[in-house]
Image (cartoon, grey):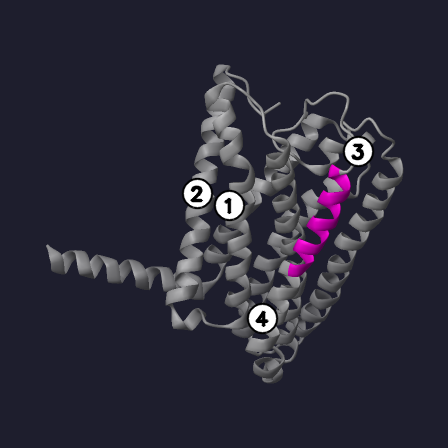
Amino acid sequence: MGLFSHSWPHLVLFSLVAVIFTMGLLGNAILLFLVHIDSRLHTPMYFLLSHLSLLDVGFPLVTIPKMAADFLQGEGSISFGGCAAQMFFLMLMGVSEGVLLALMSYDRYVAVCHPLHYPVLMRRQVCLLVVGTSWLSGVLVASIQTSITLHFPYCASHTVDHFFCELPALLKLSCADTSAYELSLSISGVLILLLPLSLITTSYSHVLRAVLRMHSAEARHKAFTTCSSHITVVGLFYGAAVFMYMVPGTYHSPQQDNVVSLFYSLVTPTLNPLIYSLRNREVRMALVKVLGRTGFRSKRCS
């Protein structure tokens, strides 16, 4: 069904979405570039953050270009295979990001509560294991959920009341009884969301106690700034995910689903690099260094 009509207010909203989409891609691409070229950012935290940026590049790319093309062409259609691919990659990105954010909280817990053991507890093999776990979790959940969803018969309406193929919107079109599957989805959604959230809560309760016991105001400020950035990102991502997958569908309308889906598939990936870059001194210094180097080269050339 898409998200916008061709009325003047919706044209303005479409332009705003296009600007946010472009800003998100640029922000995450710049963060990936800085982590790659600046040796001071070659740490476990920024290695994990680079994979978060990679997921945040993929999230909007799965939905926004297709939505924009449909809007500009004045039609809204997608093949069955395209719909399946969209659903699979969205679920892959979503689950992977949820698991990665949870495991990033463990990184902050080790950094603040066990700083002397940090190089051992977060060595390269552990970082690779963390990243591999998050991506594999996404692939596994997306493969199972997509294959089950596509096995239902869709012999009724083929009109998806959404701007992309998302699992809850598709299940409403099935002419079979999906109540048992929807119940299992709610249970698995609780597990997929609550298990990472419990790890995040446990990690940050220990972090908070450790920060409050610090004697150095500078160390306390640095720890609080780094951790508050992560908590902000976690709140944005999990807030939208809980609404979509833990609150039963009868309690929210398709219009609310559209707004929340747009938030977690576009707005949150755009805000993430801004939150980390504005609040983290190391990222700001790396950006200033690159801009200074670029300015120096342009002066030399002229």
- What residue is shown at x 47% (from left), y 45% (from top)? 24
Q: Position of residue 229 (x, y in %)?
A: 57, 58
Q: Which mark is residue 270?
A: 1
Q: Which residues are magenta?
A: 136-150
Mark before the other along the chain sequence, 3 or 1: 3
Residue 146 lies in the magenta stretch: yes
Residue 112 lies in the magenta stretch: no
Q: Secondary structure at mark 2?
A: helix
Check contact, mark 1 vs mark 2: CB within 8 A: yes
Query: Identity of the amino acid at label 4?
Result: Leu
For disc 3, the marked residue is 249
Mark before the other along the chain sequence, 1 or 2: 2
Decide which of 137, 5 is in the foreground and name it: 137
- In whole angstroms, how far apart are the C-alphas of marks 2 and 3? 32 Å
For disc 2, the marked residue is 23
- In whole angstroms, how far apart are the C-alphas of marks 4 and 1? 25 Å
Q: Nearer the viewer, mark 4 or mark 3?
A: 4
257 left or right of 295?
A: right
Q: Secondary structure at mark 1?
A: helix
